[in-house]
Image (cartoon, helix red, strand yellow):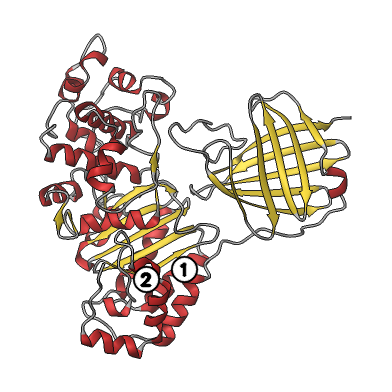
Amino acid sequence: MIYKINLTEHKEMKRSASVFFLLLVFSLRIFSQDALPRSIPEMQGVSSQSIINFLDSTAVDENEFHSFMFLRHGKVIAEGWWNPYRADLKHTMYSCSKSFTATAIGFAVKEGKLNVTDKVISFFPDQLPDTVGAFLRDLTVRDLLTMSVGQEPDPTRNIVMDTNWVRSFLALPIVHKPGTQFLYNSMATYMLSAIVQKVTGQRTFDYLTTRLFEPLGIQGIDWEVDPKGINTGGWGLRLKTEDMAKFGQLFLQEGRWKKKRILPKAWIKEASTSKILQHPEYSQEKRDSSDWEQGYCYQMWRCKNNAYRADGAFGQFIIVMPEQDAVIAITSETRHMQGILDNVWKHLLPGMQKKRMKPNDSLAQQLKVQLNSLVLPIPGNSNTSDQVEQISGKVFSVEPNDKRVRTISFEFNDEVCTMVITNDSTTQRIKFTPLRWNEGETERPGPYLLSSAPSALKGLPPFKVAGEYNWRDDNKLELVLRYVESPHTETITCQFEGDSLKFESKVSFNPNQVNVLNGTARP
């Protein structure tokens, strides 16, 4: 790839030491045709101070950020990962996956394989209930796209317990006329994925690989499947942060990539404009206060400030801002997703100007340092205990439990604590180090080492993790396990009293759910 810099830009680059630093940092990326081009904020009309202010806000609010990438005029002007998260790691997208599933529908429409007005039952004649009601008969692909199926409540939790999700979805009653009422329904997106597989003969993931992922240079990703091998559609896709930014940039460029038409401009417009309101009964004032009340598109949400976004649980965002020619990708874990968007509007939006700004070496250096030093706090307290010699190598037999854990043991060697868990069929060995993260992986996928949440995320390999331990007191060992390809963290507390062990675990997205195991050391 050849980068051309005009004379004016060249003179400005010579005057700015920060530019040369960025060129050095991204020199390896320049030779990759798949990487997005890099620049500095002021050269793309963005104040570095606005980005600094945004980063400052992430350090004091209740949201835990994992990554951030800011594109202006098609160039990355700021990017950062909060250690132990990294640029090369995938991150669970949750409902951002929905926007990719809708895009697969867009490709299928482009290729004449279906229309959004097609009836859903037409794709699954062998899966229909004995009686097909009028509402089910009228249900269209467009109703699935706009979350206006008419089912109530959201059937997702119940359907995923079945082995045939398509049949289960079609068997549920539809109580409102399709297309008239919004209800967030992840199984509607799953049905879109099932339809893509039905009409193309390929999983949605495989269908998108040659049409979307390969043209955008997106590699090394994966997507969960259901018991029948159909991609889950509404969740389960794992991408890197730059992959997210590329997807947003494709939409910003109205379906073009490297001067080639990937998706029809008409589809991009259709997919990103409001189709239905979540709460039409709300007052305008109330709707203006929320980014979830601006209208729902085709598996995307409209935002305030005439933007729109792909949106995933716990704070996964791909924000497209056409008026500002900008894309912002964020991964995080939060219970207050609106707070993240509020900070984007408060700090980043005002920093975008129409014209290029004069580089500011001091701010560029400050921003560089801040982006390079992002880190999540390590809860370390003490790395020593008088119990270490007594505990190391001791095997605790666990009382019968629904997690099917049989034994737990700990091995301490050169400050590395290896926790060994055996169950009916496997043995897991997970390493933790004090005051820093020890990278490894689990033998099972997902942030569910001892959680009662579903243990099988089909189609995904074991998750990469980072572990850290500390002693809260001589008898209490705390192990923190970050699932760095997801938003989540598991905290394990071990209380030792002589030959007994009380072992508790909780996951960050549900800290009130504590899993307790009791064990006794073998003689």
The residue at which mark 2 appears reads as 347
**Along the line of sight, which residue is nearer the eye, 307 or 90?**
90
Quarter placement of the C terminus: top right
The residue at which mark 1 appears reads as 57
Task: Tell me where residue 190 sits by quadrant.
Answer: top left
x, y (%) of residue 208? 26, 41
Quarter placement of the N terminus: bottom left
Look at the numbered disc 1 and give the secondary structure of its residue. Answer: helix
- How far is mark 1 from mark 2, CA to CA? 9 Å
Q: Is residue 59 left or right of residue 244?
A: right
**Along the line of sight, which residue is nearer the eye, 400 or 21?**
21
Q: Residue at x 33, y 66 (%)?
A: 31
Compared to residue 416, the image places residue 22 above or below, namely: below
Residue 246 visible, this angle = yes
x, y (%) of residue 348? 34, 70
Task: Tell me where residue 252 sits by quadrant.
Answer: bottom left
Question: Which circle's residue, 1 or 2, is located before the other in the chain?
Answer: 1
x, y (%) of residue 133? 20, 16
Look at the numbered disc 2 and give the secondary structure of its residue. Answer: helix
Amino acid type of the residue that numbered disc 2 sits on in the rendered structure = His
Q: Is residue 341 left or right of residue 391?
A: left
Asked whether disc 1 touches disc 2, contact meaning CB atoms under 8 Å apart, the reply is yes
**Along the line of sight, which residue is nearer the eye, 147 or 248?**
248
Q: Dot 1 surroundings within 10 Å: few (below 14), some, or many (20 or more)?
A: some
Q: Is residue 82 left or right of residue 403?
A: left
